[in-house]
Image (cartoon, rainbow, N blue to C red):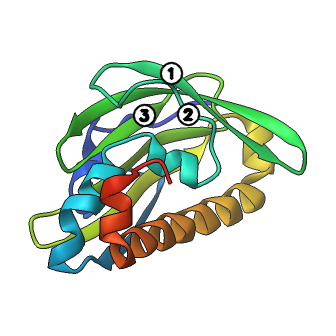
Amino acid sequence: MRLPAYERGLTRRSLENVPEGMRGAEHSTVVPPESVVAVAALVRSWEFKRRAGFEVPAGSPAADAQGVLAKRVLGIRFVEPIRVVWADERGFGYETRPGHPIYGEESFRIDERGVFTARSISRPSSFFWLLMSPALRFLQRRTHARYVRIVQDAAAHPLRQAQDPGM
């Protein structure tokens, strides 16, 4: 199965031109000014993905770092190899690696106006996963909605978040 090329770091900015053969997704929420610092601290850490139900690498996301995310679905543990494409004070983005069910990139960022956005460009990584694409799309939509809820909860409790980013 031939996978389309795309510009690494593409999800760091608005998805205006999604590569042919891939799906783009963007989900955003506005964070109140008093919560931006706490949400930014969360969004630039693996804690963000942990709260979404993933097993995460140790340490913090750093550009070019490779690792493995894992998630259990219906009792089955899916291993998801990744490489961090970029990481800064406002978030991070990673690309999938061989062995991941999805081919593409995902990022989490809070901008200078306090808008949090989760973005992804993706497609199934193999013929098997292409057959499973309706389930993959459902899980992606559900996970992106969870990302927004995690940010909204952190924004609603910025002091608690600042005291314990691992809550």
Q: Which mark is residue 59?
A: none
Residue at far left of view: 112
Q: What type is the residue that disc 1 sits on?
A: Gly
Q: Which mark is residue 67?
A: 1
Residue found at x 37% / y 41%: 45
Q: Would residue 5 be found to the left or right of residue 124 on screen?
A: left
Q: Are marks 2 and 1 in contact (CB under 8 Å)?
A: yes
* SS at mark 2 in the image: loop
Q: Which residue is mark 2?
A: 56
Q: What type is the residue that disc 2 sits on?
A: Val
Q: Label 2, label 1: how many angstroms apart (C-alpha)?
A: 8 Å
> For mark 3, does the 10 Å Cα neighbourhood hold few (<14), some (14 to 19), or many (20 or more) residues?
many
Q: Nearer the viewer, mark 1 or mark 3?
A: 1
Q: Which mark is residue 95?
A: 3
> Which comes sooner in the sequence, label 2 or label 1?
2
Residue found at x 30% / y 67%: 159
> Which comes sooner in the sequence, label 1 or label 3?
1
Total number of numbered discs in the rendering: 3
Q: Label 1, label 3: how many angstroms apart (C-alpha)?
A: 11 Å
Q: Is residue 36 above or below residue 86?
A: below
Residue found at x 41% / y 75%: 152
Q: Are marks 2 and 3 in contact (CB under 8 Å)?
A: no
Q: Label 2, label 3: how many angstroms apart (C-alpha)?
A: 15 Å
* SS at mark 1 in the image: strand
Residue 77, x across and y down, in percent = 80, 35
